Amino acid sequence: MTVKIGLVGTGTVGGGCIDILQKHKQDFQRHLGVDVELVRVCSRNPEQAAAHNVADIFTPDYRDIVNDPKIDIVVELIGGTTVARNVVLEALAAGKNVVTANKALMATHGQEVLDTAAAAGKEVAFEASVGGGIPIIDPLKHSLIANEIGTVMGIVNGTTNYMLTRMADNGMGYEDALKEAQANGFAEADPTADVEGFDAAAKIAILASIAFNSRVTLADVYTSGISQISPVDLEAARGMGYVVKLLAIAHRTPKGIDVRVHPTMIPATHQLATVNGVYNAIYVVGDAVGETMFFGAGAGSGPAASAVMGDVLEVARHVQQGVGPLVGCTCTDQLPILPVDELQMKYYIRFTVSDKLGVLAAMAGIFAQHNVSVHSVVQHSKKESTVDVVYVTHVAKESDIKAVIEEIAGLDDVLQGPPSLIRVEE
């Protein structure tokens, strides 16, 4: 039996999938016993299709794929939550299996997509939505299914990891690191989704949903980016034995799910501390398996296409064998999402203030008023008339830290602009 595939989207990842199919089709049949054929390709850019030698099966209308009775699997690689949502839902309703790399769609409309798939008795596979070429969704659904997962935590955005690595290792400022990332193709012209943490938030929403068997959406994830981080902060972290990473964090707690994305200080001895450049890594703790970590390239044509095609071949094998989805939606629990204001941990806070008598005393009084215990305070000269004042707290409550920052920001001698705030994950 030949399993027929329709592909929607011929950009970086879509083009990579076409290349893999053309290069390894015979290998798939010989090694896996899976005969797959790309029979239809849709894109807004016909020239991309021509560049990959599939102009003869090109269509500008995705409905030609969705409504083709011969097609068994629809691969959606256009991204976003508007047209892509229509492609996925219409494909499932038409009796097609779906493979997607769309993190935004699965993080916002995952319940709808998986419910539609269940109603149709079809399969949705989305390994490439998190971690590029790193296998993580399939291990959570299969290899680690015997565990109660307590923690999923990772570096899941290559852009910000590259920037923080350059800032830490070479003393580059935020703007220079961003420009270099854009020049090297690691950051988009509009980098907001990456540097403000939204890309990572979508990914941790997906991972937390699977790991904890409870629906977590993008809107549930507290998100803070790296735009206020400077080399001063990274050097201070190094001096304290820490490394700063933009971490996507999800913990199962007795009270519910703690899920968030923010710059985080982690001990330099932690496995994630040595993951640099554009690489990603996802750290998982299970009650039986203990600590595990999945590491690899998090983006790019090859890694992402590898994950997509892995899903395609697995789904194709199910089609050939006549079996339904082996693991559908696992979000059978309804665990509460913990408010970030209830978070309790250590904090690093850096203010820029006027170099005057009495300023430190006023700031210390505000910490005391809000019951925030300070572990250390260090003053760094910045300019002739200003200094950076760095506080590291003992374990404190997020809401109290926010109150401290708001009140200190109102002091006359504290320069305007948000301070640098980094949470410390032991």
Image (tube, grey):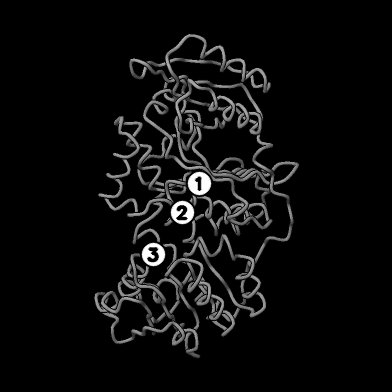
**Residue that appears at 41% across and 35% down:** 274
The x and y percentages for residue 120 are 64, 80
Q: Which residue is drawn at 51% across and 14% down?
A: 359
Which residue does the numbered mark 2 point to in the structure image? 131
- Which of the 4 quarters of the picture holds residue 383? top left
Where does the C terminus fall, quadrant-wise? top right
The correct choice, above or below, for 352 with respect to 296 in the image is above
Q: Report the Cα–Cα distance between label 1 and label 3.
A: 19 Å
Kind of residue at badge 1: Ile
Q: Which amino acid does label 2 sit on?
A: Gly
Report which residue position mark 1 lands on.
Answer: 282
The percent coordinates of residue 169 (x first, y second) are 32, 31
- Kind of element beneath mark 2: loop
Q: Is residue 115 above or below residue 307?
A: below
Which residue is more in the foreground, 43 or 407? 407
Q: How crowded is mark 1: few (under 14 residues within 10 Å), some or many (20 or more)?
A: many
Residue 15 position within the rendered picture, expressed as x and y whole percent measured from the top left: 32, 70
Cα separation between marks 2 and 3: 12 Å
Which kind of residue does numbered mark 3 sit on? Ala
Residue at 25%, 79% in the rendered image? 50
Q: Is any atom of residue 122 visible in this view?
A: yes
Residue 346, image quadrant: top right
Instruction: Give the secondary structure at mark 1.
Output: strand
Q: Within 10 angstroms of label 2, few (less than 14), some, or many (20 or more) residues?
A: many
* Element marked by disc 3: helix
Q: Residue furthest top?
A: 357
Q: Residue 305, which numbered label?
A: 3
Is label 2 in contact with label 1 (beta carbons under 8 Å)? yes
**Residue 220: image location, x then y, percent:** 63, 52
N-term-proximal mark, 2 vs 1: 2
